[in-house]
Image (cartoon, rainbow, N blue to C red):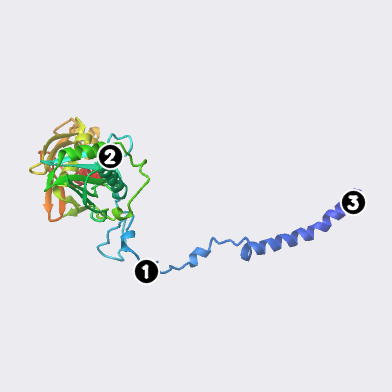
Amino acid sequence: MSSVLEKRALKWIPLALATAVTLTGCARDGFYDDRNLDYTDATSAPPLVLPETRNTQRYRDALPVPQAASQGTRLDEAADIRPPQSLAIGSGLEPEYVERREVGDQVWLVVAADTGTVWPQLEEFVRSRQLAVQDSSASQGIIVTSQADIRLQSALRAGSSEVRCERGGQTMTSCLDALESHLSSRSASASVSSSWTAQRLTDEQTLQIRQQGDEWEVVIPQSIDRVWAELNHYLELDFAQEGQRDLLAADPDGHAFLVEYMTKTESDRNPLQIVFSRDVRKTPQEIRLALQSNGDQTVLRAVNASERAFSADDQRELLERVSGYLR
């Protein structure tokens, strides 16, 4: 009996070998093609080009990349790319849905929603108050009533909006109070309607951190009063840790702030560096954050206000943190 089984098993050996050879061929050129080496012969395809007839208002760069100073150059080492400082959840800096900003006698609201979402809420406010509308333009972000002019524009922070209630360039306090109450009763998640026309109010310009000689500065494509008000709001919240970072003074007329800041260079000093230094304590130093108007832009600089060293890396570190409030 065993000899019969052995003969039958031997009959299947040629068939198994033939099957293996066949499957090997399929793996090379058939359904099981091994493509590991195909990419070595791959060539670049031409870039996709959008038609000239497209609506340019509907397209923008999600992550704008600045043009290189010289094309085709190769880097000798990895570039030092630092992510922007963000207002992370749990940092205590998450904005409320509606907040106030103030510079001098100018007061306005900052809403944590884009202009397309806020515009229907402004129209709802006008209807609920039965205000007589004299003019309304979603594309310009303005509703003119007999009591006040309600203006809407994008805020400095992405995805936020600014709302003003004015008449003759002066803030209408009662109107602004009523608007704040109305918008606060809503939320971004509860707003299901959106105005496509008002979405075009969104400002696509972004700030830029650049090096000028041995100094770093931040170029912000907004007016100096708006920038000062926004920085003042977040510096009061974030620079409130004595011995680490602290807001000492705010000067709205001079558009400047005086802060104490513990730089990374100082906080990372090792025991040997401390022993051989004049000051054995790790302490923050005074820095002046100065804003300067440059046409329709604002330039932010960090100026050393102490006798201690303040390197370019320290300067950039502080500017990156502060400019993160505006992203």
Distance between the alpha carbons at the discs numbered 3 and 1: 78 Å
Q: In the image shown, does 95 or 290 lie closer to the viewer?
A: 95
Callout 1 touching callout 2 (CB < 8 Å): no
| As drawn, 77 above or below 245 | below
Q: Is residue 173 above or below residue 10?
A: above
As drawn, which residue projects farthest toward the right?
Answer: 1
Q: In percent of the image, x 79 and y 57: which residue is there? A: 13
In the rendered structure, the answer to whether residue 158 lies left or right of residue 248 reads right
Identify the residue at horizontal 7%, vertical 42% (top origin): 253
- Which mark is first along the chain, 2 or 1? 1
> Is 36 on the left-hand or right-hand side of 143?
right
Q: Secondary structure at mark 2?
A: helix
The three-letter amino acid code for the residue at tag 2 is: Leu
Q: Gap between marks 2 and 3, in whole Å? A: 92 Å
| Residue 234 in sight in this render | no
Seen at 86% across and 55% down, the residue is 8
The location of residue 325, given as percent across then percent down, is 24, 43
Total marks shown come to: 3
* Residue 249, x across and y down, in percent: 11, 35
Q: Say whether residue 209 is left or right of residue 81.
A: left
Q: Nearer the viewer, residue 235 or 29?
A: 235
Note whether residue 188 is visible. Answer: yes
Of residues 216 and 37, the one drawn nearer to the viewer in this rendering: 216
Question: What's the amino acid at mark 1?
Answer: Pro
| Residue 324 horizontal/vertical position (percent) | 25, 44
Q: Nearer the viewer, mark 1 or mark 2?
A: 2
Q: Earlier in the sequence, mark 3 or mark 1?
A: 3
Q: Which residue is mark 1?
A: 51
* Mark identifier at residue 3: 3
Question: Callout 1: helix, strand or loop?
Answer: loop
Q: Which mark is residue 183?
A: 2
